[in-house]
Every structure is written in C-alpha cells, then in structure tokens.
Image: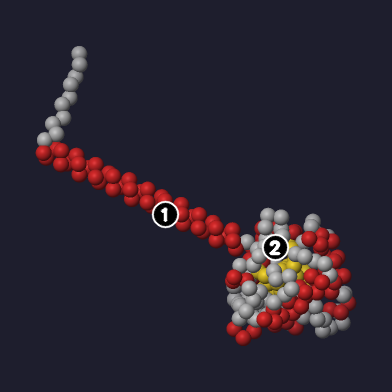
Amino acid sequence: MSICITVRTGTRVGADLRTGVRSTARSIVRLALAVGAAALLGSAAGGVAAAAEVLDANGDAVAPVAEALPIDPETTTRPGLYATPAQAYRAQQIHGARVLLLDVRSTAERRRSGVAVATNLWQPLLPETAAERSADFLPAIARAVQALPRGRSTAIFVVCENGRTAAAAVDLLAAAGYKNVVLVTGGLSGEVEGGRSGWSASGLPLRRIGS
C-alpha cells in the first residue's frame, strides 16, 4: 500500500513558504557574519599579543614595540632593546630561568620605592655603602648568569628607579659582551618629567622593604 501526500501551494501557502525561506536565509547570513567577525577579531587579538612579546621562542630579545621606547633621551641605550614593565614581568613568567631581572638601584632607592617581586638579582651599579661595594658589578653579573641555563645568552632585564641608571648598566653590560640585555623602560617609578610610567604605576607585584 502506498501513501501519497499532496501539499497545496496556493497563494497564501506559497507566501508563507517564501517568508519562511527568507527568514531562515537572513538568520544564516547573520550567523555567518557573526562567526566571521569573531574569527577576525580573534585573529587580530592574537596578532597583537604575539607582537607584544619581548622575547622569541629561544629567549632572545626582539625589536621593541612603540610603547616600550623611552621618551627620556637619558634612558636610551646602545643595544636599543627595550621592554615595558608588563612585558618584562610576562617574559619572566613565560621563560623562567632563561630570564634574569636585575635591579641596579641603591639601598635608599629600594627602601623608598619598594622592590619588584619578580627581581632575581640586586646589584647596585652605583654603590653607596660598604656592603654594596663588596662585590664589583660585572663579576657579580657573570656569577649570576653562569648558574642559569643559557649562561651569557640569558635575557637580562635591567631595572632602576627611572631608567637612567639602568641605561648606563645596559651599556656597560653590552660593552662587556652581553648581547641579550633589555632596559625596562620607566623603571620602578617612571621616567622623569612625565615620561613613560614604571613598574609601580603598571600595577605589577611589588613589595616594601624595611628602613
């Protein structure tokens, strides 16, 4: 036995059918546009995130982004490698022992402004006390990187109060043959005369030390 079903497509039924088809088509188009836009935005966001990384997969410094370039001319360096405080902190979280965050401030500056929690080594470039003068700057850095997996190829991020002392330290290290040395732009407290903001203003982990 066979069953035959006949659908009448008169004017009213045909109109309803056409309306339904158009509505479905519009819904499909809207969905496709939404999916395409989301994919495009996701791709753009991924590109920005990738561009913001200051180290490549090997742990070598890459060309700085515009936001990392110093405004204060006294903080420019011969190597020309710069990172925002946020980039320096993120690099350490990602690369671990392939990164050395070096604080070159004096004891007085550290007590006044606090210390970046991520700091791996404190070695004042301009010692003020007998204790600070007990170890020469370059030998202390050499001992520190010797204990790390990449040795002298370790990415060294140098931070000070406002970027000026760190710039001098970067140039000194570069002259000594270190090629992966990056200035943390703005230091702890920001560049002088309203330049780049520093570690504190970026809301990154900071701790106070006793007087």
Query: Between disc 1 and disc 2, whose residue precedes?
Result: 1
The residue that appears at 20% across and 41% down in the rendered structure is: 18
The residue that appears at 67% across and 76% down in the rendered structure is: 187
Question: Mark 2 belongs to which amino acid?
Answer: Ala
Residues packed near mark 2 inside 10 Å, few (<14), some (14 to 19) or many (20 plus): many
Closer to the camera, 69 or 89? 69
Q: Which secondary structure, mark 2?
A: loop
Q: Which mark is residue 37?
A: 1
Question: Mark 1 belongs to which amino acid?
Answer: Ala
Q: Which residue is mark 2?
A: 61
Q: What x and y, as percent, mark residue 152?
A: 81, 62
Q: Is residue 16 at all visible to an observer of this figure?
A: yes
Q: Which mark is residue 201?
A: none
Direction bottom: furthest residue = 193
Q: What x and y, as percent, mark residue 31?
A: 36, 48
Q: Quadrant of the C terminus?
A: bottom right
Q: Which secondary structure, mark 1?
A: helix
The residue that appears at 11% across and 40% down in the rendered structure is: 12
Decide: is 23 above or below 161. above
Residues packed near mark 1 inside 10 Å, few (<14), some (14 to 19) or many (20 plus): few
The residue that appears at 37% across and 51% down in the rendered structure is: 33
Q: What x and y, as percent, mark residue 141?
A: 83, 68
Q: What x and y, as percent, mark residue 23?
A: 25, 46
